[in-house]
Image (cartoon, rainbow, N blue to C red):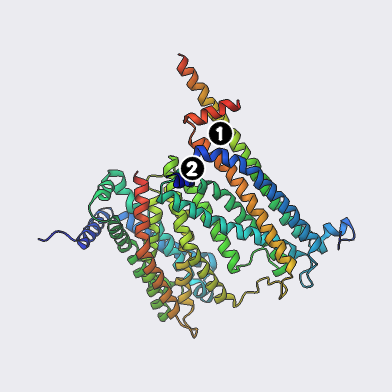
Amino acid sequence: MAKSQTWLYFSSPKTFYPLAGKLIPWFTALAIVLTVIGLYMGFFVAPTDYKQGDSYRIIFIHVAAAWMSMFIYAVMAGYAVIGLVWNVKLSEMMASSLAPTGAIFTFLALWTGALWGRPTWGAYWVWDARLTSELILLFLYIGYMALQSAIDDPRRASRASALLAIVGVINLPIIYFSVRWWNTLHQGASVSPEMAPKMAADMKTTMMVMVFAFWMYAIAIVLARVRTLILEREKNTAWVVELLEAKQ
Amino acid sequence: MSRPGVFDAFRAVVARDMTLAMRRKTDVLNALAFFIIAVTLFPLGVGPEIETLRAIAPGVIWVAALLAAMMSLGRIFSGDYEDGTLEQMLLGNFPVSIMVLGKVFAHWLLTGVPLVLLSPLLGMQLGLGEEALWVLIYTLLLGTPVLSLIGSVGAALTLGVRGGGVLISLLVLPLYVPILIFGAGAVEALGTPSGIQPYLSIQGAILALSVALTPMATAAALRISME
Amino acid sequence: MSQWHSIGEFFAMGGYGFYVWGSYLVTFGFIIAEIFLVRKQRRDVRKQIARLARLNDKVDET
């Protein structure tokens, strides 16, 4: 009994709340350190690209944001499954607190993609397969958040949007496949901004550092948002009232 | 008479929905009227040159069909939701996905099929050749059921939600992208060596996948909405 | 300052300054905005709960 007990110990909002509180500073520190390293490597270590000059430096945060936007949607769908199947309230809350961060990363991926596309392809928006599927991913996020806020009763809201996230994650590969097919059909192999044939090793590591920096940041911000959601959702429970009185 | 089987339940739901819809024809006619008007607006906007119209015709007809089908999604469950019959249906001894399939099939018969019958008329208006019209009909026949199937998930999720109509389009439109791409793409691929075969087979695959998976999702969404 | 010979050159970013700084500033701008948004959300919820608690206390007293 003890073994499974510990595994479930942190699945109740009451015990998870302080744990999240302790974790946030660690992840924030990690995020800051990694960002500083990433920026230093991105601007001072990585050489100027012979073809694209210095505009390629946008790739570090563009790829990181795009990667995070898809990763967060997958994690969100994962929490949605746990929330719906095992009826775990906390994982429903995690799914709802992941969505805004995912949406912001998707928007940033589109923004940086556009600003990078301008000097490289000559246009802010190009119907490239990846950019188009990123845009559709943004619509999925907006749909998730719109459904979440349209339903008043919080429990039904998180369960309904959890189901939407699952339907969305099943459709994502199909959407991505069809957009790639559609893109190659109309433009032939689109001139996507391929880097120098062999991307210099330190460019790859810089990108990985930025991805991890964004990841740590995402964990910290989502944990902070889930704590607020817990307070809001459990506001009439005894432990929340005591907690706030203690803080008064 | 032996105990009613699953197919009898399916048939009963379809028959019931059809008769209900026939009593209030406006909903059905609205979607068709929207489809016709939306397609005829394009030449007014784009200009009468038949060349450009022929180029954009499949996309225009497909998008208009998609929006027309989506307009009437709200009514799949809302009528029964308001007067409580939906709750009884959920308690029935047949799996909920059978009831959902019945309702979606009825919705398809009422909106999808008329769109397919109307599309050649509008295709001619936009200068599509005879062969292209046939391809348009095939793709729409394969595509419109998927519109109703995936749309039913959106309808179930937004039951009784204020501003549900607009919300459904926000939830469901991103999921319609693959069907739109292959539907419109097939008509354009007429002259190409690969022909329309790959498009129709992929549309068939999406249809098979949707028929298998979406009723379960809609059933779950209905349970969530009815809690 | 391995390859940038002057601050000016660094900001010019090989002529692509607008694009590079446009994307970096907006990215970190959004991140900081999100942090403040979450903190504000947290403050509002705490205030709301505190008000609820005060109301309950008043109800208990009467």
Q: Secondary structure at mark 1?
A: helix
Disc 2 residue crowd, few under 14, some 14–19, many 20+, Cα 10 Å: few
Q: Is residue B82 visible?
A: yes
How far from the left and from the top, in percent, is residue A162? 45, 51
Checking the image for residue C45, the label placed there is: 1
Chain at tag 2: A
Left or right of residue C8: residue B60? left
Q: Secondary structure at mark 2?
A: helix
Question: Residue A230 at what x, y percent from top left?
Answer: 52, 38
Number of callouts:
2
Given the current orientation, which residue lies at the most extreme top position?
A: C62
Mark 1 against mark 2, which lies toward the viewer? Answer: 2
Please state, as top left, top right, bottom left or bottom right, where the C terminus of chain C lies in the image: top left
For the residues labelled 1 and 2, the Cα–Cα distance comes to 26 Å
B215 to A242, vertically: above or below: below
Q: Residue furthest right?
A: C5
Residue pictured at 74% horizontal, 63% vertical: A57
What residue is drawn where x is 46% and y is 18%? Answer: C59
- Residue A148 is at least partly visible in this image: no
Measuring from the top left, give residue B66's x and y in whole percent.
43, 63
Please name the amino acid that badge 2 sits on.
Answer: Tyr
Of residues A232 and B54, which is closer to you in this image?
Answer: A232
Picture residue at 73% right of the left edge, 56% below the top: C22
Tag 1 subunit = C
Vertical order, B191 against B2 (above or below): below
With respect to residue B175, does C44 lie above or below? Answer: above
The front one of C1 and B204 is C1
- Which residue is pictured at 52% across the width and 57% down the height? A74
State the residue position of label 2: A9
